[in-house]
Amino acid sequence: MENTTEKKFWQVLSLSEMTRIQWESLCDGCGRCCLHKIEDEETLEVYFTDVACRYLDEETCQCPHYSMRQSFVPDCLTIYPDWGEKFNWLPSTCAYRLLHEGKPLFDWHPLISGDVNSVHLAGISVRGRTFRDDEIAPQEVFKHIIDWVK
């Protein structure tokens, strides 16, 4: 019988203590970090849009150029353990943000569910819900603010 009380790595290690493999496994594959965001300059509140990076694979919600993504998109989001206040640029469902805030992972997270498709089955991923950024004029992005990502 499996010992279910044994703590998992994300429950005992800080973000900065994780190996690269552990760090990368925190990504649930939702694709929400690939959505364009707008920051209110006065309140610093971050708003998500349904406009995604043109390189995001809409079916898998993964970047086919992940390892060299900044060659394609120089300002592509790169998450670091010591990000501090920048974690608010991630969705509230993101494992990196949750762990930074001392919160548990959701049941649908692949590390909990054991199923990489659970993020899609739970309706958390951006699959089928986005426009490519090369289809939307930059001045029109603000018209695409959404409320299904916070």
Image: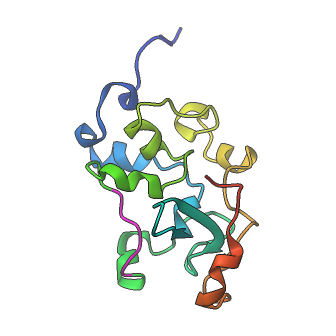
Q: Identify the image quadrant of residue 129.
A: bottom right
Q: Name which residue lies at 35% across and 51% down.
A: 85
Please determine whether, in this image, residue 147 is positioned above or below residue 56: above
Q: Which residues are magenta?
A: 74-79
Q: Main secondary structure of the magenta part?
A: loop
Please determine whether, in this image, residue 94 is positioned above or below residue 142: above
The verdict on residue 30 being magenta is no
Provide residue 122's location: percent of width, then percent of height: 73, 43
Provide residue 115's location: percent of width, then percent of height: 62, 40
Provide residue 145's location: percent of width, then percent of height: 67, 68
Please determine whether, in this image, residue 83 is positioned above or below residue 2: below
Q: Nearer the viewer, residue 63 or 145?
A: 145
Q: Identify the image quadrant of residue 13.
A: top left
Q: Nearer the viewer, residue 148 or 105?
A: 148
Residue lying at the far front of the rendered structure: 42
Q: Nearer the viewer, residue 12 or 39?
A: 39
Q: Nearer the viewer, residue 54 or 36?
A: 36
Provide residue 146's location: percent of width, then percent of height: 70, 63
Q: Name which residue lies at 55% across and 65% down.
A: 62
Q: Name which residue lies at 45% across and 61% down.
A: 44
In the rendered structure, the answer to whether residue 9 lies left or right of residue 119 reads left
